[in-house]
Image (cartoon, rainbow, N blue to C red):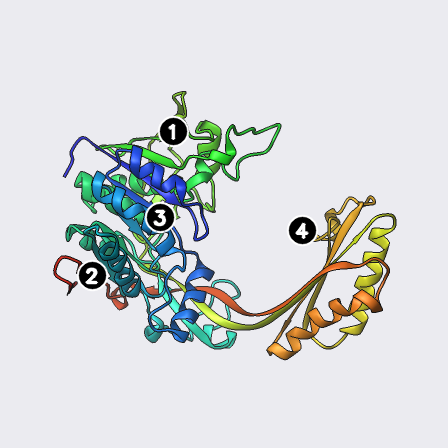
């Protein structure tokens, strides 16, 4: 336990994030821990499907590529890694990481946190948050994962494992748990829990707080975006923190980037709910210290929610897509004609059909399209069907535009894929039973405990 302070970084803000900044953080950050946030609602549902097809799969397919360059610097610097990249199968992910360590000659103790999968306990009569209809009315349910928090992750850290892999853990909890472990915070101290949750919320999207996604040439310039550094927090024992990045990396950390991330995905600043605490952000102070350093503090906490949020995945049909480009004089009119042709040919074939022209109205629809004549535009047609064969008709009709549509069409892309829908509900805390499985490559044992 460190009673003076801790340093924690974020090496991934989503499953496809860059890898090099995480290695840099471990090498030069003098971190106690680094967290990789790699899991979203849809990601875990898709992972559940992969696990159904392969019982040894179901974790983040990029995990090996991401962890391999980290193992040696993690061991050398004593930095601990916490990640939710276990997705639908943290146990298999932990075995894979232990194998990577053995293959590379790096002694690696890995702890898997299991138990967020509550599919067999899901109340199908419970209403979905999105539309109020019972879950069972949305089709075949394929996954149900409860958002677990620090009470599930802390036991894994207490084993001394260098790598902790979870499934559907709440994003800020990946940061709060190592801070609690390092600084000895009491879970009953709601303000400390809120402070750590605030820090986790600011770090969880990695490059977003250092200028990524923030960048807008002119009003919000970001230097060195190609070399964007990922964030770290210098955390005091009282929960105050400085958000910063490594010297020599691209990006910026200032009051603007921090405030923008502070409001990310927050609907009620009085009560940002996690499994650990209800975070009140209304008293948070953000102080620009200069030199890519921003001080934050003033978080307040209230009692955590009685029930845990559950992310539910269900089979929502098949999406058929087709795209084709038109360029030069009259491109827009030819694209519009192609759109009318496809609509007529697909009339009645699919229950839901969407036709957009990229460059005109594909993002915000006709209401906000300003018109004008683009030099080039791309027709996109997408439809949702109950079976794959019907979904494939969309791409077939768009492909047919080559010779049976307006002049000058080219660059067709067609695809049809299964769609996994995502719903939200809740489950009682007492119905979620998490466990920790420790794998140590020195004796090839797996030890399981609550």
Distance (Cα) linking label 4 and label 3: 30 Å
Q: Which image quarter: residue 402?
A: bottom right
Element carrying mark 4: loop
**Camera-side residue of 147 and 216:** 216
Report the residue marked by disc 2. Answer: 436
Please tell me whether mark 1 or mark 3 is closer to you in this view.
3
Please tell me whether mark 1 or mark 2 is closer to you in this view.
2
Of callouts 1 and 4, the N-terminal one = 1
| Residue plotted at (43% across, 44% down) | 205
Of callouts 4 and 3, the N-terminal one = 3
For mark 1, does the 10 Å Cα neighbourhood hold few (<14), some (14 to 19), or many (20 or more) residues?
A: few
For mark 2, does the 10 Å Cα neighbourhood hold few (<14), some (14 to 19), or many (20 or more) residues?
A: many
Please tell me whether mark 4 or mark 3 is closer to you in this view.
3
Distance (Cα) linking label 1 and label 3: 26 Å
**Camera-side residue of 24 and 269:** 24
Report the residue marked by disc 4. Answer: 363
Query: Residue 229 appears at what percent x and percent y?
Result: 42, 34
Report the residue marked by disc 1. Answer: 285
Query: Residue 278 appears at what percent x and percent y?
Result: 34, 47
Tags 1 and 4 touching, CB below 8 Å: no
Query: Residue 268 appears at what percent x and percent y?
Result: 45, 45
Distance (Cα) linking label 1 and label 4: 35 Å
Distance (Cα) linking label 2 and label 4: 44 Å
**Quadrant location of the N terminus in the rendered image:** top left
| Residue plotted at (75% across, 71% down) | 397
The circle drawn on residue 166 is none
Viewer can see residue 433: yes
Please tell me whether mark 3 or mark 2 is closer to you in this view.
3
Please tell me whether mark 1 or mark 4 is closer to you in this view.
4
**Quadrant location of the C terminus in the rendered image:** bottom left
Q: Is residue 445 left or right of residue 279?
A: left
Report the residue marked by disc 3. Answer: 36
């Amino acid at each position: 336990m460190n009673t003076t302070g801790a340093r924690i970084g974020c090496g991934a803000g989503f499953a496809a994030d860059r890898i090099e900044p995480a290695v840099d953080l471990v090498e030069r950050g003098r971190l106690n821990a680094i967290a990789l946030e790699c899991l979203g609602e849809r990601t875990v549902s898709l992972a559940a499907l992969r696990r159904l097809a392969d019982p040894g799969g179901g974790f983040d397919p990029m995990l090996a590529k991401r962890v391999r360059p980290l193992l040696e610097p993690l061991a050398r610097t004593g930095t601990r890694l916490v990640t939710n990249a276990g997705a639908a199968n943290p146990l298999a992910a932990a075995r894979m990481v232990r194998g990577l360590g053995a293959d590379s000659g790096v002694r690696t103790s890995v702890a898997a946190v299991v138990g967020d999968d509550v599919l067999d306990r899901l109340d199908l009569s419970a209403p979905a948050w999105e539309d109020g209809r019972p879950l069972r009315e949305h089709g075949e349910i394929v996954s149900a994962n409860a958002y677990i928090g620090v009470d599930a992750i802390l036991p894994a850290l207490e084993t001394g494992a260098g790598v902790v892999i979870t499934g559907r853990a709440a994003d800020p909890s990946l940061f709060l748990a190592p801070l609690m472990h390092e600084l000895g915070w009491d879970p009953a101290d709601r303000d400390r829990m809120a402070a750590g949750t605030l820090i986790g919320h600011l770090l969880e999207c990695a490059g977003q707080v250092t200028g990524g996604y923030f960048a807008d040439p002119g009003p919000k310039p970001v230097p060195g975006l190609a070399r964007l550094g990922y964030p770290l927090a210098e955390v005091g024992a009282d929960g105050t923190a400085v958000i910063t990045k490594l010297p020599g990396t691209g990006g910026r950390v200032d009051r603007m980037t921090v405030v923008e991330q502070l409001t990310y995905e927050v609907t009620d600043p009085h009560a940002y709910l996690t499994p650990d605490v209800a975070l009140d952000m209304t008293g948070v102070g953000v102080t620009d210290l200069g030199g890519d350093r921003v001080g934050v503090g003033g978080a307040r906490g209230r009692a955590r929610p009685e029930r845990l949020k559950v992310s539910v995945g269900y089979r929502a049909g098949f999406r058929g897509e087709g795209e084709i480009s038109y360029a030069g004089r009259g491109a827009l009119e030819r694209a519009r004609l192609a759109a009318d042709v496809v609509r007529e040919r697909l009339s009645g074939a699919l229950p839901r059909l969407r036709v957009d022209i990229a460059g005109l109205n594909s993002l915000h629809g006709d209401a906000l399209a300003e018109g004008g004549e683009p030099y080039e535009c791309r027709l996109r047609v997408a439809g949702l069907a109950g079976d794959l064969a019907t979904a494939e008709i969309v791409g077939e009709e768009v492909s047919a535009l080559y010779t049976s549509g307006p002049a000058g069409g080219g660059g067709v892309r067609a695809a049809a894929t299964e769609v996994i829908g995502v719903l939200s509900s809740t489950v009682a805390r007492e119905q979620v039973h998490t466990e920790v499985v420790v794998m140590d490559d020195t004796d090839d044992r797996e030890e399981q405990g609550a």
